[in-house]
């Protein structure tokens, strides 16, 4: 379960947080497909508890496995998957299977289903009290049994050892596979036993060649196991059964590009043992996610988000230039209150992103459309499989490296960078795709002259609005 089954040379997925299915389908056709994105993670698609003022987090409180939420219904989901697959973009579903809702009275869902959470009664599935672990609160994260068998924030904890629970989850997963999706993010995987998850994964159907997948292809599964070391549950208990989201990664990059750590230390960032990272092939990486960009989950003040654009774009560019892991780009809506949901009308319906000159303008941030980020997605596709070479640093906060002879990047967090560096590239004039692009045979940003021995004088001044420079063989003049 560690192959995302991207089409062709694609390498990167984007989390279109809280987007509606119809808008995602259009985004696949208008932008993601043509720009070379490989996939989209969608917010939980199953019916959830409706909470007053519609916070984003209501979607992590399931009431049933019917496909109906503020993103759309089953027909709209099906149409989206079909249209995205058609333009080479896969769909991954955020799957909330650790628990159902917390207590609420009355409790009604996005599809009109009702429940009695305090009695552990969810007729929409159906689940009864027999399907849950006896209520207790997770308090001690050093106790693995408590983390897995008690409730996370009062969310009623399903017992995945039970056949009925397994069967209901497997049925839901197989329906999503039948609708053409390529895989799942397993929410709160750390709060479930690996052996229970393994038993569930074993019964998930293979992806269908009818939906354009190779024969005998298993769906991609990436599990949310936040492990920064020192807790009762370890990420290394999970990467044998499927992929794992590597939370250490974004924390390291956040500190690095905030200037709180020494960038030169990233020289051995592909040494998994030195950094206590899970093996690259099993890792899904990101700079920020929907939780830690607003202080939920882990990471705190280390995490970089769209709110700090210059270092954020540098961190994302590093992630996309560096070969470790499977990359996911975050695409957010703007917020001041961390509970605040996406842009919505007074009836609660989500307002579609409005795009003017390629940028989202009405409360959606759309980092995935920022020119520097979309260019680096293209870069990652182009250098896929090339070795990290020609590492250079000034010993402090300036670094550079190449990906074989196809691409080159340099980063400057501190002071002015003005150096003759080995780029690994064939001689020629290259256009920096961070500050511009090749337009009508001319470079609209910085040009860099690579001479016969592969070296070039690279300049990134601290006063510039971008702290990264990127060259590749498709942006050669
Ligand atoms: C409150 C109290 C509880 C009390 C409960 C019951 O805090 O102590 O027991 O009421 O009266 C929301 C509220 C939370 C509330 C809870 C239940 O924020 O205050 O509990 O609902 O009513 C998201 C949000 C949570 C939110 C949850 C459900 O982050 O704040 O809880 O959705 O709506 C750990 C985990 C990791 C998790 C991360 C946030 O290891 O798995 O915390 N991350 C994932 C998702 C995340 C989601 C969940 C898990 C739960 O990425 O978005 O939580 O599905 O690190």
Image (cartoon, grey):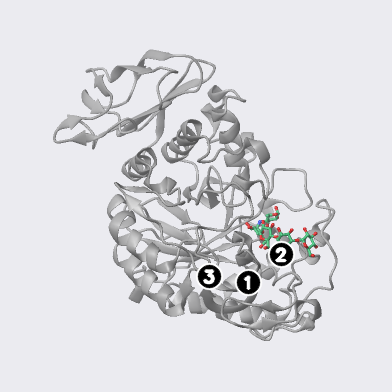
Name the disc covering residue 347, or none. Answer: 3
Indicate the secondary structure of the residue bearing disc 2: loop
Where residue 257 sits: x, y (%)? 54, 29
Look at 51% across and 18% down and name the residue there: 414
Q: Are marks 3 and 1 in contact (CB under 8 Å)?
A: no
Q: Is residue 213 left or right of residue 19?
A: left
Look at 14% across and 33% down and name the residue there: 441
Where residue 442 sits: x, y (%)? 17, 30
Where is 394 relative to 332, above or below? above
Image quadrant where residue 149 sits: bottom right
Residue closer to the observer: 417 or 51 = 51
Q: Is residue 448 left or right of residue 62?
A: left
Which residue corresponds to mark 1? Answer: 50
Q: Quadrant of the C terminus?
A: top left
Name the disc covering residue 192, or none. Answer: 2
Image quadrant where residue 402 sits: top left
- Res 426 seen here: no
């Amino acid at each position: 379960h560690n192959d995302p089954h991207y089409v062709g040379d694609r390498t990167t997925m984007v989390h279109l947080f809280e987007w509606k299915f119809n808008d995602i389908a259009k985004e696949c056709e208008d932008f993601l497909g043509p720009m070379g994105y490989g996939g989209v993670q969608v917010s939980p698609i199953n019916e959830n508890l409706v909470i007053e003022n519609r916070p984003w987090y209501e979607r992590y409180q399931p009431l049933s496995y019917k496909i109906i939420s503020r993103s759309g219904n089953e027909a709209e989901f099906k149409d989206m998957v079909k249209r995205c697959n058609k333009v080479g973009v896969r769909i991954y579903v955020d799957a909330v299977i650790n628990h159902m809702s917390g207590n609420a009275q009355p409790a009604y869902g996005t599809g009109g289903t009702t429940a009695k959470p305090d009695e552990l009664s969810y007729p929409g599935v159906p689940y009864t009290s027999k399907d849950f672990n006896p209520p207790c609160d997770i308090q001690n994260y050093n106790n693995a049994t408590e983390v897995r068998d008690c409730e996370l924030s009062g969310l009623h904890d399903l017992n995945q050892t039970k056949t009925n629970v397994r069967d209901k989850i497997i049925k839901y997963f197989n329906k999503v596979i039948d609708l053409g999706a390529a895989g799942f993010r397993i929410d709160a995987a750390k709060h479930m036993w690996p052996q229970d998850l393994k038993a569930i994964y074993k019964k998930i159907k293979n992806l269908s060649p009818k939906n354009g997948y190779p024969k005998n292809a298993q769906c991609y599964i990436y599990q949310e196991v936040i492990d920064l070391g020192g807790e009762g549950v370890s990420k290394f208990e999970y990467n044998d059964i499927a992929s794992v989201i590597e939370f250490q990664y974004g924390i390291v990059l956040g500190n690095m590009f905030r200037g709180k750590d020494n960038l030169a230390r990233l020289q051995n960032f592909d040494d998994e043992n030195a950094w206590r990272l899970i093996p690259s092939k099993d890792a899904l990486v990101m700079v920020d996610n929907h939780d830690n960009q607003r202080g939920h989950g882990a990471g705190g003040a280390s995490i970089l988000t769209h709110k700090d654009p210059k270092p954020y774009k540098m961190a994302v560019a590093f992630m996309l230039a560096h070969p470790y892991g499977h990359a996911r780009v975050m695409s957010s809506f703007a917020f001041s209150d961390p509970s605040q949901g996406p842009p919505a009308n007074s009836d609660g319906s989500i307002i579609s992103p409005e795009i003017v000159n390629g940028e989202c303008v009405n409360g959606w941030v759309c980092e995935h459309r920022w020119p520097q980020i979309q260019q680096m997605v293209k870069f990652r596709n182009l250098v896929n499989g090339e070795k990290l070479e020609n590492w250079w640093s000034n010993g402090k906060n300036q670094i550079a490296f190449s990906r074989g002879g196809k691409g080159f990047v340099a980063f400057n967090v501190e002071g002015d960078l003005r150096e003759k560096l080995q780029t690994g590239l064939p001689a020629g004039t290259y256009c920096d795709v961070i500050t511009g692009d090749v337009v009508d045979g001319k470079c609209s940003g910085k040009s860099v002259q690579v001479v016969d021995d592969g070296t070039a004088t690279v300049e990134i001044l601290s006063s510039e609005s971008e702290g990264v420079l990127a060259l590749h063989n498709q942006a050669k003049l």
